[in-house]
Every structure is written in structure tokens, then in C-alpha cells.
């Protein structure tokens, strides 16, 4: 190792200072990137939507009689409903939350109205701006009662 | 710093200290940023209130309903058909998460034994013995405000109740794996056949943290 008091030593010290500045700049850039990723993160909104819809479905099941409820999903999220859970997702990942339903009521299904026909769709792939919840009760000729909630898009 | 020895003993340790503080500051900043970033919403209280509303007021819950005219009476609990322990009507509500919630609904029946000068004045299922309100296990006797009372109770998901109650009693109310409890009180009318009582009903809802 050379004598640092000399000309070569001074340039070595300069290299160290440059390395320090580069490292500090690197850390600063990483922090800025971390903040930018956090700002663009949709986790909070997905958590909010999943919980909000789950509480809404529990409330709709509890409500007496038939009703319609239009819900604005408020964003470009993929929304899946079924098997006791709401799944809200986008390209960054999925979030789910549970809802409650009475034992003798049909589990909720997400459907889409196409040409006047309600069609079950692959909820994992479609994006809906609105959900319409319809609580229904039907009685067939034998007196069998079927109750539940249908969800469809306009 | 004049020479090689100065470089080794002064400059290198100084750089190590600088790196150490830089890493310390970086982690401190990350901690501060993370502390203020909210990505979750706690809806356990809202969920508890929704469940309470479900049980208290819904036809699918405990509300008394006249099937002939298909009308339910909010604020009135149908004891014999829905509340009585042997009916277990509460368990008709299916949670998406089978282990994530539980509830206990209870109310005190008429004070059955009033403590006056240490003497129990009534001969009932719950007896005041040695200063304690006692009876059979299923009578749920309890001393409340100097009165020995018999509590009527029903459970929603009793197995979950036992597990979640242990978590709450242990103080594990925050973080994943813990559980939270919400106590909700409502003045209700209890209809048991032709008899109707007015009681304050306590609804304890247990929900697992997520």
C-alpha cells in the first residue's frame, strides 16, 4: 500500500470518497424507489374492497325479503365471489376476506347478463365496474323454497 | 494521516463507522416509512356489529317471526324456537372461515336469590352458599350486584368460542394468530311461548385477527 501523504495516496482517498458518495446515492435511490412502490401499491384498496363487500354480503343475507343493491367496485380490480370468500385482485396479487351466509340459503354466485341470459363467468379473468346484488326467493311447484343472492354486472 | 499506518488505524475504522451509521439510518428510515404506511383495515368491530345485527334482527337469526304472515319482530328473541340451547339455531350461520369467529349470547333471568344480610330470600336453582352463588353447571349461576342470578346463554360455534376465548383471556388480542372480542349490549324482549320478558342481552363476538 502506498504512502497516503503522497500524490498517489491523495488519489486513493479520492476514490474512497467517490465510493462513499456512490453508495449514499444508491441508498437514496433505493429509498425513493421504495416510496414510489408504496405509493403505487393497491393493497390497501384491495383490503378495503374485500372487507367492504364481505360485510355487505353478510348484511344482504340478513336482510328480510328481496332486495337489489348496486355496488360500485371503484377500480379495475378482478372480483371473485364464492365458497364463503371475496377475492379482490389485480396484477400485483389477490386479497380475500370471509363472509357469512345462512345454512339453508344458496351460496352467492357472480354472474353476467349477456343477451338477457344470466351466464356464469370465469370471475378470475373479468373486470367489473359495478356489481348488482339481488336477493331472491323462489318457490317451485312442489313448494320447495330456494333463497340466495345473485350478483351480476349491468 | 501521513502514512500507511495512519490509513490502517484511522481511515479504515472511520469508514467502517460511516458504513455502520449509513446502514443504521437506512433501517431507521425504512422503519419510519413502514410505520406510517397503512395497508390493512381492521373491521373486526364492524363485523361484530354486523353479526350482532344478524342474530338480533334477522329471520335467519334469533328474531321472532310469525310464519303465517311472514313478518319478523325486530327486538324480540324467539327463545323456544331459536334461542334454547337444545335448538342450536345459531349455528345455522356458516362463516366462510370455519375457525375464524364465535359468539356467546346471554342474558340474566329474574334475580332468583336476593342477598339480604347474608341470607338468600328465595328457594331456586341458584343458591347463595358461603357467599357464592351456586347451582348446577347448566344453571350458569352468577352473583351480580348483590343478587344471585341465573344466566341463560347460547353459543355460536362453541368449539371456536373455547379456543378464541383462551386467546383473548391470555391477552393475545393483537397480531396474526390472536383474536379480538367485542361486547355488545341490547335491550331485547325474550319470547318464550306466551311469556315475554324484557332483558338486557349481552352479545360477545370473537373474531380471529387476519
Image (cartoon, helix red, strand yellow):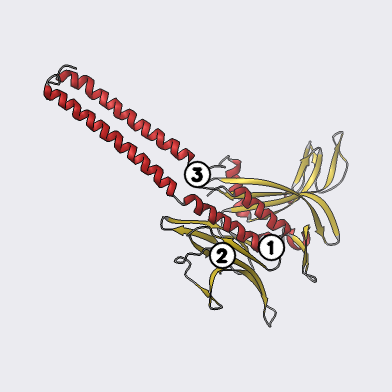
Residue B28, position as x, y percentages in the image: 40, 33
Disc number for residue A63: 1
> Can you say whether A85 is above or below B141 in the image?
below
Q: In this rendering, do the residues under marks 2 and 1 share a single chain?
A: yes
Query: Is B198 or A46 nearer to us in this picture?
Result: A46
Q: Does A101 sit left or right of A89 as displayed? A: right
Query: Is B62 or B163 nearer to us in this picture?
Result: B62
Kindly identify which residue carries mark 2. A131
Q: Earlier in the sequence, mark 2 or mark 1?
A: 1
Query: Is B67 or A56 nearer to us in this picture?
Result: A56
Residue B93, position as x, y percentages in the image: 64, 61
Query: Which chain's residue wears label 1?
Result: A
Q: Is residue A42 visible?
A: yes
Q: Does A27 sit left or right of A45 as displayed? A: left
**Residue at position x 78%, y 66% in the image:** B71
Q: Residues within 10 Å of mark 3 (few under 14, many from 20)?
A: few
Q: Does B138 sit left or right of A102 as displayed? A: right
Kindly identify which residue carries mark 3. B38
> Can you say whether A77 is above or below A35 in the image?
below
Amino acid at each position: 500500500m502506498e504512502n497516503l501523504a503522497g500524490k498517489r495516496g491523495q488519489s486513493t482517498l479520492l476514490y474512497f470518497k467517490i465510493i462513499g458518495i456512490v453508495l449514499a446515492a444508491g441508498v437514496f435511490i433505493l429509498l425513493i424507489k421504495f416510496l414510489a412502490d408504496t405509493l403505487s401499491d393497491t393493497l390497501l384498496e384491495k383490503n378495503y374492497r374485500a372487507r367492504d363487500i364481505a360485510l355487505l354480503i353478510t348484511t344482504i343475507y340478513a336482510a328480510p325479503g328481496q332486495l337489489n343493491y348496486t355496488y360500485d367496485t371503484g377500480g379495475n380490480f378482478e372480483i371473485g365471489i364464492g365458497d364463503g370468500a371475496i377475492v379482490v385482485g389485480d396484477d400485483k396479487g389477490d386479497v380475500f376476506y370471509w363472509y357469512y351466509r345462512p345454512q339453508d340459503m344458496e351460496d352467492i354466485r357472480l354472474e353476467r347478463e349477456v343477451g338477457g341470459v344470466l351466464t356464469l363467468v370465469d370471475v378470475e379473468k373479468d373486470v367489473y365496474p359495478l356489481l348488482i346484488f339481488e336477493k331472491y326467493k323462489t318457490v317451485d311447484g312442489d313448494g320447495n323454497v330456494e333463497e340466495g343472492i345473485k350478483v351480476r354486472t349491468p | 494521516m501521513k502514512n500507511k499506518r495512519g490509513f490502517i488505524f484511522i481511515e479504515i475504522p472511520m469508514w467502517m463507522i460511516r458504513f455502520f451509521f449509513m446502514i443504521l439510518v437506512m433501517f431507521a428510515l425504512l422503519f419510519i416509512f413502514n410505520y406510517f404506511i397503512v395497508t390493512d383495515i381492521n373491521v373486526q368491530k364492524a363485523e361484530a356489529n354486523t353479526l350482532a345485527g344478524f342474530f338480533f334482527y334477522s329471520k335467519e337469526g334469533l328474531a321472532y317471526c310469525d310464519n303465517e304472515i311472514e313478518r319478523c319482530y325486530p327486538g324480540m328473541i324467539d327463545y323456544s324456537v331459536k334461542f334454547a340451547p337444545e335448538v342450536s339455531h345459531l349455528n345455522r350461520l356458516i362463516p366462510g372461515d370455519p375457525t375464524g369467529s364465535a359468539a356467546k349470547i346471554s342474558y340474566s333471568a329474574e334475580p332468583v336469590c336476593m342477598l339480604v344480610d347474608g341470607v338468600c330470600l328465595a328457594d331456586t336453582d341458584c343458591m347463595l352458599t358461603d357467599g357464592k352463588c351456586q347451582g348446577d353447571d347448566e344453571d350458569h349461576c352468577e352473583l351480580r350486584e348483590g343478587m344471585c342470578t341465573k344466566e341463560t346463554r347460547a353459543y355460536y360455534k362453541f368449539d371456536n368460542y373455547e379456543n378464541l376465548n383462551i386467546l383473548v383471556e391470555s391477552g393475545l388480542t393483537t397480531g396474526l394468530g390472536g383474536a379480538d372480542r367485542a361486547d355488545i349490549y341490547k335491550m331485547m324482549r325474550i319470547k318464550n311461548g306466551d311469556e315475554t320478558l324484557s332483558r338486557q342481552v349481552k352479545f360477545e363476538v370473537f373474531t380471529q385477527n387476519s
